[in-house]
Amino acid sequence: MKTSDFRDVFVRVQSDLLIIDDSIMTDRHHASNGNYEDTDPQNQIGGIIPAFSPSGWLRHGMEKAVHERDGTVCHPGEANANFRKDGVYNRDLDAGYHPKGDCLEDEGGDGCVIHDLFGGFGNRPGKVMRRPIRFSPIRSSVDYTRGQAEGHYRRLNRNIVSRNREDNREPLRNTEVDAVANLDGAWHLSFREAKPEFIALLAAGIDYLDAHQTDFMHQLGGARNFGGGIVDCELMNPLYEKSELRRVFDRGKGNTKRMDAKDDEWADECLPELQSALTERVEHVS
């Protein structure tokens, strides 16, 4: 097994409702013959979900996976920042985090595995690139091997209304939110350097997020009290070829015998070896 073969991996994400607070970029400006009315439930609007919110969601799951192995990770905030809530920051440090960059033993060191993956300190880039997710309501136009998804965009209106009998639910304020429903697709992640502990931590973090998908802390995006951001997720077998990756999303087909054999190989041979590397890395830094 060569970890260099795992530079590009895919995470399957499925969600009934996703509301990304830092906005969804739609392709409405391409409108010509189709239905591009953003309030129409049968519109043909596609677009891009920026990687910022999914990246934070993924990082949180991976941090928890390190904590479960009795390790600490870099806090996402700069250690010398002037935080408005110092008490919160200090409680974070007591909850399995260390000041960002404190794990670097020397200029050539890699630090903790989270620092190594996500970077962001000084001139050190992260080693995992999180790509945006392109979505479309037209399933035939979705290319899952390029990190795309089927999803249905809608702009929703939310009204805050009066509560007294005389005003009869007169709207007090109107807000609009961008929503994607029935999302099902592949999120493309690329490793600039495919270390074995990176793959193992990704698998562990995704498993953690899937197991805690209804926890408020681990839902993705906004509207969490309304069922938004509950994500079924799994790391797709990195041993799959592109044709096998597409087959996973073909609702009329099941796994081939070759795919089943690759699933067994991944679970019984590859993943345990990668997990050993992760355990060694966490113990070394801790």
Image: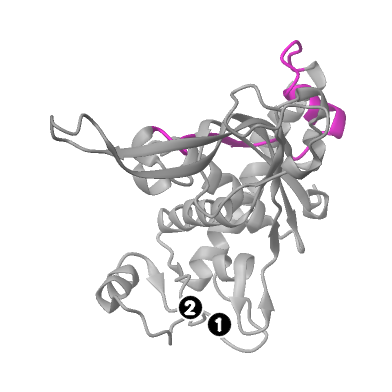
Q: Amino acid at mark 1?
A: Leu
Between 231 and 107, the residue placed more toward the observer is: 231
From the image, which quarter does the C terminus lie in?
Answer: bottom left
Residue 253 among magenta residues: yes
Say whether residue 219 is visible: no
Q: Which residues are magenta?
A: 227-255
Query: With 58 as the anchor, is 93 left or right in this view?
Result: left
Between 95 and 265, the residue placed more toward the observer is: 95
- Classify 46 as above or below 248: below
Say whether residue 122 is visible: yes
Query: With 257 as the anchor, is 16 left or right in this view?
Result: left
Location of residue 46 in the rendering, given as x and y in whole percent from the top left corner: 71, 36
Residue at the front extreme of this rendering: 166
What colour scheme governs how the chains and residues are painted in the rendered image of this protein?
Answer: one colour
Between 101 and 151, the residue placed more toward the observer is: 151
Query: With 133 as the anchor, is 18 left or right in this view?
Result: left
Residue at the left extreme of this rendering: 165
- Classify 248 as above or below 209: above
Regarding mark 2 in the picture, which secondary structure is present there?
loop
Mark 2–mark 1 CB contact (< 8 Å): no
In this rendering, the count of numbered labels is 2
Mark nearer the viewer, 2 or 1: 2
What label sits on residue 136 in the rendered view? none
Location of residue 207 in the rendering, given as x and y in whole percent from the top left corner: 52, 40
Query: With 152 as the anchor, is 171 left or right in this view?
Result: left
Q: Amino acid at mark 2?
A: Lys
Would you call the spot at circle 2 few (<14 residues within 10 Å), some (14-19), or many (20 or more)?
A: many
For the residues labelled 2 and 1, the Cα–Cα distance comes to 9 Å
Give the residue displayed 33% in from the left and 74% down from the top.
89
- Classify 269 as above or below 273: above
What label sits on residue 104 in the rendered view? 1
Q: Which residue is mark 2?
A: 100
